[in-house]
Amino acid sequence: MHQRSENRATGTCSVVGVCVKRPMTLTENAAVVEIDALELRERLEAGQASAFFDVRTPYERELASIVGSRLLDEARVQEIEALDRKTPLYFH
């Protein structure tokens, strides 16, 4: 659910992630919103993206990662399930 675009001339890349606002009840749908790299950085710097997960493989994460993200593994899934349902979830 994320896009990656690279600018080979400058050697930069931008990652578009998603923010998921979880439903409060089983009958509600989750709200999934795409955000760009700048907005994600602003939310991270403001402390608004404390539940920020990297959905790539461990090998991909070793190549490059965003500071503050955590690898989405089985332990993190349990952590997500334990979070307050009002906590927005961020994935890249």
Image: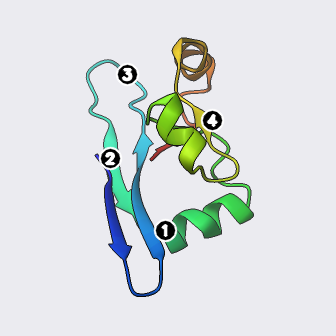
Residue at 28 percent of width and 29 percent of height:
28
Real-space CA distance between mark 3 and mark 4, rounded to the nearest whole angstrom: 26 Å
Real-space CA distance between mark 3 and mark 2, rounded to the nearest whole angstrom: 16 Å
Q: Is residue 82 above or below residue 16?
A: above
Relative image position of residue 79 (x, y in whole percent): 62, 18
Q: Nearer the viewer, mark 3 or mark 2?
A: 2
Q: Secondary structure at mark 4?
A: strand
Q: Is residue 31 above or below residue 59?
A: below
Q: Which residue is mark 2?
A: 32
Q: Which residue is mark 4?
A: 70
| N-term-proximal mark, 3 vs 2 | 3
Inspect the image, locate mark 3, and give the three-letter code of the amino acid beneath it.
Thr
Labelled disc at residue 25: 3
Real-space CA distance between mark 1 and mark 3, rounded to the nearest whole angstrom: 30 Å
Real-space CA distance between mark 2 and mark 1, rounded to the nearest whole angstrom: 16 Å
Real-space CA distance between mark 2 and mark 4, rounded to the nearest whole angstrom: 19 Å
| N-term-proximal mark, 4 vs 1 | 1
Residue at 49 percent of width and 68 percent of height:
37
Q: Nearer the viewer, mark 2 or mark 1?
A: 1
Q: Which residue is mark 1?
A: 37
Relative image position of residue 65 (x, y in whole percent): 59, 49
Q: Are marks 3 and 2 in contact (CB under 8 Å)?
A: no
Extreme-bottom residue of the structure: 9
